[in-house]
Structures are given as C-alpha cells and as structure tokens.
C-alpha cells in the first residue's frame, strides 16, 4: 500500500501538533471557517505537500453524507442550462458540495434509470430540470423520500419546491411591447403543454391578448412539440398557413424563435419588416443573430442559486415546507421587432 493511501487525518494532526478534529474541519470546505486562518493554512500546506486526499467514500459511510447533489437535465445542448448550472455550482461549492450533472433527455425510463444510479452513489438530493406538470419521476423521488427541488420548470401539485421565472408576466411584457408597436395580428408558438413553461406562457399570452381586447381573429396559437429550432421552423410554417395576415410572433423560447427566422428566410419574408419575432430566455448569442433577437431575459444564474439553496435547506430540514420562488423577467428589445408595415 502506498504512503498516500496510508496517510490519515491523525497523521497530519500529529505532524503539526493539533487535534485531528481540527484537521477534519479544515479538509471540509463547509467547516473550514471554524478554524483559525493560520492553522487552516498550515494544514492545507502539509496536506498538499504529503499528497493527502480525503476518503469521501469512507467519510460518507461514517457520516451518511456524501457531499454530492444530482442535477438532471433534459437537454444539455440547450444554452439556457449552462448559466443555471453555474448558479447551482456557485452555491453548492460554498457548502462543500459537488454536483453530478446528467443529460437524461425526455424519456421517463431513462430519467428513472439516471436517478436510481445517482441514488446508488449516495447523492444527498436532486435538482430536476426535467419536470413535467404531472410527472411520475417526481412521484418516484417523493416516494423514496429523496430531497428534490425543481428548477426552471414546476409541476401542478405544489408537493416539491421549485424555482421558476414568471411566465405570465413575461408574456404580458411581450404582448404589451408588440401592441405598443402597433401590431394587431399576433401569433404565439407555444412550448409543449405538458411542461409548466409551455402551459404558463401560453396562458400568459391568452390573458394578454384578452387584456388588450384583441378579437379572436386577431390572434392565433400553435403548439410546438419541443423547445427546438426545428420544431420552431415547422410550427412557424403551420402558423403562417393558418394565420396569413400575421405581423408578429411571440415564440415560446429562443430556439423556437430561431426556427421562425429559418422559415421566414425560406419564404423570402423579412424580420422585422414583414414579421416581428420575440423570443424567450435571452440565451447566449441571440444578440448576434441577424437581426438581433428581442427576447425575454430570465434570471438563469439566480435561478440556479435559489434552487441550490432550497435543496440544501431540504437536505438539512427534511420536513421543511415546499415553496415556489418566482423570479421576475425582463424584456430586452433588439432589432427583431418593429412597427408593422401596415402601420
């Protein structure tokens, strides 16, 4: 057995003449602040010199704490998720936790398998970005008494905490902007109604057009099967066929809006001269599109931070009540919206 494997906390403590519990606190980022800075510096320097690394598996068996949190994503290629992950990690690392991130897709069997694997590796809690409004995976987690928090999406029963953006307000901001420019024939490409984001953004759009007293023939809704660029292109084709006099599109997210860009170009239509387009999320680089995309900015980094805090609270207080944190969105006006030509 190598020297590195034989080295223990007690060995380190003996070398600098402190109690081994002091060394233990220093080696845990969550408790390091309890030790004087000069002592902590000495311990860390010696540990680095001797190549000491804590045995997390052994510590987990002893304390029933692994320091691991599972993060389950539906599509890691979607640019909205990296800043959410950055927010999650910034909070977890302060408390000595490490996230395990898995791209689980939308298949429920795959998601169940991923969660079983994470639980088998003793994750202390789960952050789900995959939740549907009526989600059997959430049912499974709750039945197993796994601390769980939903992020970016919620569900209908309120049994678990979630951190989301205010989708109703977001669509009100979108429609207010388009109405203010003079648009009176507005289409909405909604995300899947099985997801809280798709359902609530659609509901927000309907409330907004009714608030502005648009007649039924002045607005139209098409549901995209997914939040993807190709789904947006196909939905835009259907929307234009069904609503040929449309002058503006409120897209369910930025990828759907990019699909709208694609189809409008195919048809020889100009944005915003012929049709204005508004996205949702303000994902990276949409300001570099041609034209730059007007969109709703959601507080993705803050969303990740709040979700991580709620999960850590649930881990430490298993009986804590479920809460919903709803973050305020902001409309970012760029070049993809303008007054309709008819105006």
Image (spheres, grey):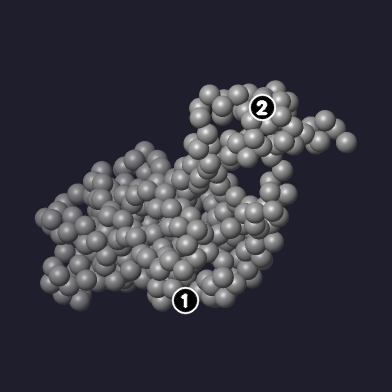
Picture quarter with the C terminus: bottom left
Q: Is residue 239 left or right of residue 11?
A: left
Closer to the camera, 1 or 25?
A: 25
Residue under numbered circle 1: 134
Relative to residue 116, is residue 78 depicted above or below?
Answer: above
Q: Residue at x 49, y 42 (%)?
A: 94
Picture quarter with the N terminus: top right
Mark number for residue 17?
Answer: 2
Q: Position of residue 177 (x, y in %)?
A: 18, 55
Mark number for residue 296?
Answer: none
Relative to residue 41, is residue 270 depicted above or below?
Answer: below
Q: Quadrant of residue 14?
A: top right
Q: Position of residue 312 (x, y in %)?
A: 48, 55
Mark 1: secondary structure = loop
Judge the density around disc 1: few (<14), some (14-19), many (≥20) Cα neighbours within 10 Å.
some
Circle 2 or circle 1, nearest the eye: 2
Residue 230 seen in the figure: no
Q: Is residue 296 left or right of residue 58?
A: left
Closer to the camera, 302 or 230?
A: 302
Q: Residue at x 69, y 39 (%)?
A: 54
Mark 2: secondary structure = loop
Q: Position of residue 200 (x, y in %)?
A: 33, 68
Closer to the camera, 98 or 244?
A: 98
Q: Residue at x 27, y 65 (%)?
A: 168
Closer to the camera, 79 or 52?
A: 52
Residue 28 seen in the figure: yes
Judge the density around disc 2: few (<14), some (14-19), many (≥20) Cα neighbours within 10 Å.
few
Q: Position of residue 163 (x, y in %)?
A: 39, 59
Q: Residue at x 13, y 56 (%)?
A: 180
């Amino acid at each position: 057995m190598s020297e590195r494997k034989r080295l223990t906390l007690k060995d380190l403590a003996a070398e600098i003449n402190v109690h081994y519990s002091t060394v233990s606190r220093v080696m845990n980022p969550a408790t390091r602040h309890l030790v004087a800075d000069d002592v902590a510096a000495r311990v860390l320097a010696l540990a680095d010199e001797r190549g000491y690394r804590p045995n997390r598996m052994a510590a987990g068996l002893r304390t029933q704490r692994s320091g691991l949190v599972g993060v389950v994503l539906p599509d890691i290629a979607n640019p909205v998720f990296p800043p959410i992950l950055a927010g999650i990690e910034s909070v977890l690392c302060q408390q000595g936790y490490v996230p395990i991130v898995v791209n689980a897709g939308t298949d429920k069997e795959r998601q169940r398998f991923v969660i079983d694997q994470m639980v088998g590796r003793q994750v202390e809690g789960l952050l789900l970005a995959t939740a549907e409004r009526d989600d059997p995976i959430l049912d499974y987690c709750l039945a197993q008494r796994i601390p769980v928090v939903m992020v970016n999406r919620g569900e209908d029963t309120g049994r678990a905490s979630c951190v989301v953006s205010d989708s109703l307000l977001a669509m009100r901001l979108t429609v207010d902007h388009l109405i203010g420019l003079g648009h009176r024939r507005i289409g909405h490409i909604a995300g899947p109604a099985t997801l809280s984001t798709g359902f609530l953004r659609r509901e927000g759009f309907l409330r907004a057009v009714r608030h502005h007293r648009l007649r039924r023939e002045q607005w139209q809704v098409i549901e995209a099967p997914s939040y993807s660029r190709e789904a947006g292109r196909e939905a835009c084709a259907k929307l234009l066929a069904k609503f040929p006099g449309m002058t503006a599109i409120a897209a369910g997210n930025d990828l759907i809006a990019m699909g709208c860009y694609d189809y409008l170009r195919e048809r020889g239509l100009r944005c915003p001269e012929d049709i204005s387009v508004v996205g949702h999320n303000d994902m990276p680089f949409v300001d570099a599109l041609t034209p730059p995309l007007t969109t709703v900015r959601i507080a993705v980094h803050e969303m990740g931070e709040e979700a991580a805090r709620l999960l850590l609270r649930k881990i430490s207080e298993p009986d804590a009540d479920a809460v919903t944190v709803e973050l305020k969105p902001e409309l970012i006006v760029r070049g993809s919206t303008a007054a309709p030509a008819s105006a």
